[in-house]
């Protein structure tokens, strides 16, 4: 089994997990949408919010479908060429476990922060129109995405750092 195979398995599992959470989010979104439709006061802000929510929902579904059905594409993007050649024995090195966990953690952070970031951008644009600018929430959402990207891009360096000074080289 190659190291890239482990990534593929983990990403598919992550995709299934996201599918379950998307279904849970869908229930809440439909409840909000039905309340909005039957409300007598249809404000343009509500319609815009519904449109942004629908867009984010579609993006989340597309990302999840990529996690489940286009796993090989994602694995090619996040794995190094050596990961496709390196056989992983049943005793996996700590560094490899750290590296895989960091990549998956980074992907989770990115996927969960992305809808919030879109929503915060939408709120920020509205606040520009009302002259009540508040950049702090937008910046905090952006920082979460950057942290996720750092975890994915620098997973090897961080795993090397975490693995320094460990007496046991492999997990059994």
Image: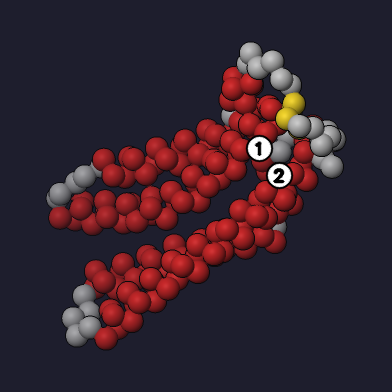
Does 12 sit left or right of 64 as displayed? Answer: right
- The residue under label 1 is 100
Looking at the image, residue 145 lies above or below residue 38: above
Q: What residue appears at the point 62 percent right and 60 percent down from the top-left corner?
A: 16
Counting from the top left corner in percent of width and height, residue 86 is at 83, 33
In the orientation shown, which residue stands out farthest toward the front?
A: 172
Q: Nearer the viewer, residue 128 or 21?
A: 21
- Res 17 visible: yes
* Helix, strand or loop under label 1: helix
Q: Secondary structure at mark 2?
A: helix
Say which mark, if any, is on residue 7.
2
Q: Residue at x 20, y 53 (%)?
A: 127
Circles 2 and 1 in contact, beta carbons < 8 Å: yes
Q: Position of residue 87 (x, y in %)?
A: 85, 35
**Where in the figure is residue 24, as x and y percent of width and height?**
46, 67
Q: Nearer the viewer, residue 128 or 30?
A: 30
Determine whether, in the image, residue 70 is placed left or right of residue 27. Answer: right
Task: Work out how far the residue at label 2 is from the one at label 1, CA to CA, in angstroms.
Answer: 7 Å
């Amino acid at each position: 089994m190659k190291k890239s195979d482990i990534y593929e398995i983990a990403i598919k599992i992550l995709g299934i997990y996201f599918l379950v959470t998307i279904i849970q989010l869908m229930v809440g979104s439909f409840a909000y949408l039905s309340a909005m439709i039957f409300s007598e006061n249809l404000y343009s802000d509500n319609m815009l919010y519904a449109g942004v929510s629908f867009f984010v929902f579609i993006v989340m579904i597309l990302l999840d479908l990529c996690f489940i059905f286009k796993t090989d594409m994602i694995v090619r993007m996040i794995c190094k060429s050596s990961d496709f050649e390196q056989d992983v024995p049943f005793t996996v090195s700590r560094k490899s476990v750290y590296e895989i966990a960091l990549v998956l953690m980074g992907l989770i952070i990115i996927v969960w922060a992305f809808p919030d970031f879109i929503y915060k951008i939408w709120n920020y644009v509205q606040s520009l129109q009302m002259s009540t600018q508040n950049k702090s929430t937008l910046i905090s959402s952006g920082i979460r995405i950057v942290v996720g990207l750092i975890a994915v891009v620098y997973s090897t360096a961080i795993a090397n750092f975490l693995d320094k000074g460990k007496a046991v080289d492999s997990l059994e």
